Image: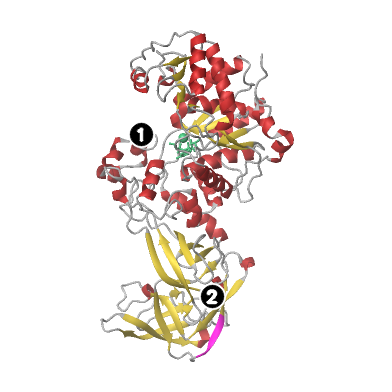
Amino acid sequence: MNKPIDVAPRNGGAARAASAVLERPADEPAGGGAHFLRTIIAEDNALGRYGGRVVTRFPPEPNGYLHFGHAKSIVLNFGLAAENGGTCHLRFDDTNPLKEDVEFEDAIAGSVRWLGYDWGAHRYHASDYYDVLYDFAEWFIGQGLAYVDSQSADEVRRTRGTLTEPGVPSPWRERDIAENLDLFRRMRAGEFADGTHVLRLKIDMASANVNMRDPVVYRIRHARHHRTGDRWCIYPLYDYTHCISDALERVTHSICTLEFADHRPLYDWIIERLADGGKLARPLPHQYEFARLNLTYAVLSKRKLIQLVEEGHVDGWDDPRMPTLVGARRRGYTPAGFRLFNERIGVSKSESWIDMGVLEDAMRDDLNATAPRRIAVLDPIRLVIDDYPEGRSEMMSAPNHPQQPELGRRDLPFSRELWIERDDFDETPPKGYFRLAPGAEVRLRYAYIVRCTGVDKDAQGNVTTVHCTYDESTRSGSPGADARKVKGNIHWLSADHALHAEVRLYDRLFRVPFPGARERAAAGANAQTKSSSIEGDDADADERERNFLDDLNPESKRTLAAFVEPALAPAAPEARFQFERHGYFVADLLDHREDRPAYNRTVTLRDSWNANPKAKGRNP
Ligand code: ATP
Ligand code: MG
């Protein structure tokens, strides 16, 4: 009997494998909550089922960019491995030569690394196993467990039966082994056209589980593969490839989303037979299913994401509004925020919807702790302090973080002419308005108390300048500065010192929780009723009735000519800040330059969507 095949040692060896043991990222939330996968792994370890090994894998198909749903799977798989001193493999599931590309592979690997994870030496491809998979297929034929079916794809589909009716055996099901082997070899040799034959496992056409009704495992496809070139004209299917890849890599816990639960008997059938035949080593991997991430105000289907990009509804895959990881990075979302989010939503076995607010809150909480504070005036109007000497300026001092004095302070130049926010002044203020109004007093944050004495207007009656006087004895930080209390406290920038900056105010890409859902469904849906009708991406009939593009938020991006404080001059791309009273912002990864600053709003300081009565569908 052949020795069982075990690729993990061949590809790395013990030393390299050991060096790839995952470190828990420093900012990983500690001591995460219990969930069924953590429990299972702890139990397996206690029982010594895998000799204490924990090997997981993240298996993306290199046919697109990763999205927030993938982040859940990445954090889960790499996280579980890290918690247990194990390893997580990055395996490109490249069994479809038509849709895949190395460009996607690089982006995917980059996003996994960006999230803070390291696969060490364990970067694999399903296509690495094509030879082994082929040998195993011949073995199945030799055992009488596989046959070449010469029906068309249509016939195969039609004779598969339904949930209530058994399938109809193919007329080719009883071909003898020698003929099957000969045909399969000729399939591989390129003698046949696409679609003329397939290889099927011979399991049970009457099985209650449709996946067990002689599943197709190889099809002919005369297509060039981005890694194996023209070496193959037959390609293995996912169900056959995936379980064998897991077993070859000595994966212990193979974690996937719920729609694969019905495929688990096939997963086990294939690798059990191969292990019985001495082709695979035991203990074999076990598949576990968890609920995929469904996020409100977003779409996570690859098809829809492609449509958004190709039809130009967004500025590319890495548009900061896209729920992709390359988009998240430009938006200013943080890897630690994703990990925090994943801890908060947990892992479950039943479908549910998570409100976008939960993700935004996780980002807020992470950024609140880490982002230095800065001043930006986004919608400027001029304020002149008439009794402040012309030409004079002085340095005010502002803390970089109110709760973290160790982060120090920075200087903020003050002068006679300032920029303030247009909406911090109101000529006819409503009741309870504590900002600037004729005759009213406010504190200019980190500076003086000023009183509004009048305004200049243009020909149309719009206010162009606000005039004030100031009280020299109220300078922040000076003795007695707080003797006089005022309710309003507004930010400002010295007009002579402020820097121009382009600021992009990003908001949710969709204006409703369930883009494309029927009005009734959208208005009445709560997490519960909605989740019961969801299977996978867009199996919900309600969702097909309207075009999800009709629900795009027309205000998801606003570009402003703003001012920022001089201390931001050296900010590097991807530096993150809180702009006081506005939210969290990031210097754009691609567009930000010292002489042409560009900031993206990551998230506002507070959730304004949740307060909106139209924004229903939030998870309780
Ligand atoms: P496709 O339809 O192309 O298969 P996919 O979203 O499943 O799309 P894959 O590249 O196959 O993309 O996914 C890689 C891994 O990410 C799989 O293990 C899959 O289960 C997981 N994954 C995909 N979407 C989600 C999601 N929304 N939540 C959690 N995990 C997900
Ligand atoms: Mg998939």
Residue at horizontal 51 percent and vertical 14 percent from the top = 182
* Contact, mark 2 vs mark 1 (Cβ under 8 Å): no
Is residue 393 highlighted in magenta? Answer: yes
Magenta-tinted stretch? 391-395
In the image, residue 475 lies in the stretch drawn in magenta: no
Query: Which amino acid, mark 2?
Result: Pro
Label 2 to label 1: alpha-carbon separation:
53 Å
Label 2 environment density (alpha carbons within 10 Å; few <14, some 14–19, many ≥20):
some
Residue drawn at the location 45% of the way across and 81% of the way down: 418
Q: Quadrant of residue 127?
A: top right
**Residue beneath label 2, please?**
566
In the picture provided, is 167 more to the left or to the right than 80?
A: left
Residue sitting at the far front: 191
Name the kind of residue labelled 1 in the image. Ser
Q: Compare residues 250 and 619 and report the one nearer the observer.
A: 250
At x 68% / y 30%, what residue is drawn? 10
- In the image, residue 312 sits, relative to residue 69, either above or below, namely below
Q: Badge 1 is on which residue?
A: 532
User: Alpha-carbon neighbours of circle 1 within 10 Å: few (<14), some, or many (≥20)?
Assistant: few
Q: Quadrant of the N terminus?
A: top right
Q: Position of residue 80 (x, y in %)?
A: 59, 38
Under tag 2, what secondary structure? helix
Q: Is residue 555 above or below residue 161?
A: below
Q: Nearer the viewer, residue 620 or 463?
A: 463
Residue 385 position, x and y percent, is: 44, 87
Query: Which residue is farthest right?
Result: 15
Locate the C terminus and report the quarter of the image it occupies. top left
**Can residue 485 be seen here?**
no
Q: Please provide percent x and percent y for residue 437.
A: 35, 79
**Circle number at residue 606:** none
- Residue 604: image x %, image y %? 44, 60
